[in-house]
Amino acid sequence: MSDTDVTQENPAEYCPGGYHQVQTGETLNRRYQVIHKVGWGYFSTVWLCRDLQKKKYVAVKISKSGKKFNETALDEIALLNCVNGARKKESQGENVIHFLHDFKLIGDNGLHVCLVFELLGPSLLHLMKNYGPKGLPQTCVKRILQQVLHGLNFLHKKCRIIHTDIKPENILVCVKADNFQQYMAEAEVWNHNRTHGGVDANFLTHLFETGNVDMLGVKIADLGSACWTYKPFSEEIQTQQYRALEVLLGSGYSTPADIWSTACMAFEMATSYYLFEPQAGERFSRDDGGNPYSQCIENRHSDVTVQG
């Protein structure tokens, strides 16, 4: 993926079986008024909406309409419903995104499954890019890791779920109500942040400058690739830079695969470099692993933006 297309989904994917064409200002399911796009991924687009019934802002994830995309979205809903059930029973799971509702809509390109989530802020990747090329402060890295590990412990032990795709893009920063106006003003900047110098200091980086790291909260998001501990959906999981050894070897995997990815992410937060960057060789592909190679986060190509 090139620098020129990384901030926007492929327009050619707005076709039968592909993305749903959303118009700013329209109302989805007679309830969710669209404000603007805040993210996208291979499977879906994500929109900042106002819930007209609850009088609050939410994020609506609209999947592509192809059969496999609908099946994946329904699997995700089953996993998220399990998370909601375990959260009520255990009074835990505060570091996993809250799933609120789902609905279906029919558009020109087919039937789309839609998921409604609590509104969170930008991804950890955006925070890392905006802060600078030297890595996040150690106190910040520790706080984020504590929260991610709490979230994974809940998913693994209480929900019997393997996330399978832990990476900075899928860790979202929490936004407090008193910061919401700044969130609204900066959301469009986060969504198109591809400048070489990043974005000027905002209320997120101010947390570091003022020493208020304890205010920083994160949540694990995007269970679109997750699976049950007792029922893997795919043999190949995880983004290449965070792929565990057992997955590379094809020897089966379980919850430790998420911990491997978290450790890789910890190194990246602290240094702004990948711990491993797989490269193809004469006798093996990039997917087969290759030699470790670090790449600065400033040159990183992301496939998913905010809440993708």
Image: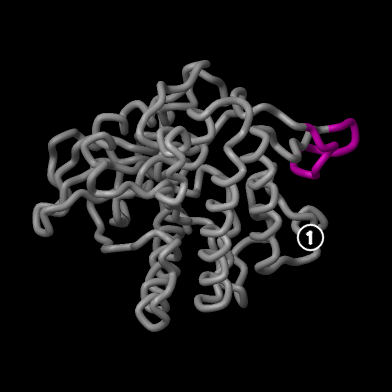
Q: Is residue 65 above or below residue 301?
A: below
Q: Is residue 265 left or right of residue 106?
A: right
Q: Quickly name the residue at label 1.
A: 246
Q: Is residue 290 above or below residue 298?
A: below
Q: Residues within 10 Å of mark 1 (few under 14, many from 20)?
A: few
Q: Position of residue 133 (x, y in %)?
A: 61, 25
Point out the residue furthest to the bottom here.
89
Identify the image quadrant of the N terminus: top right
Q: What stretch of residues is rendered in magenta? A: 281-293
User: Residue drawn 79% across and 55% down?
Assistant: 245
Q: Is residue 30 visible?
A: no
Q: Position of residue 136 (x, y in %)?
A: 58, 37
Judging depth in this view, the residue of 175 and 156 nearest the camera is: 175
Q: Position of residue 223 (x, y in %)?
A: 48, 58
In the rendered image, residue 143 lying in the magenta stretch gets the answer no
Identify the image quadrant of the C terminus: top left
Q: Is residue 69 visible?
A: yes
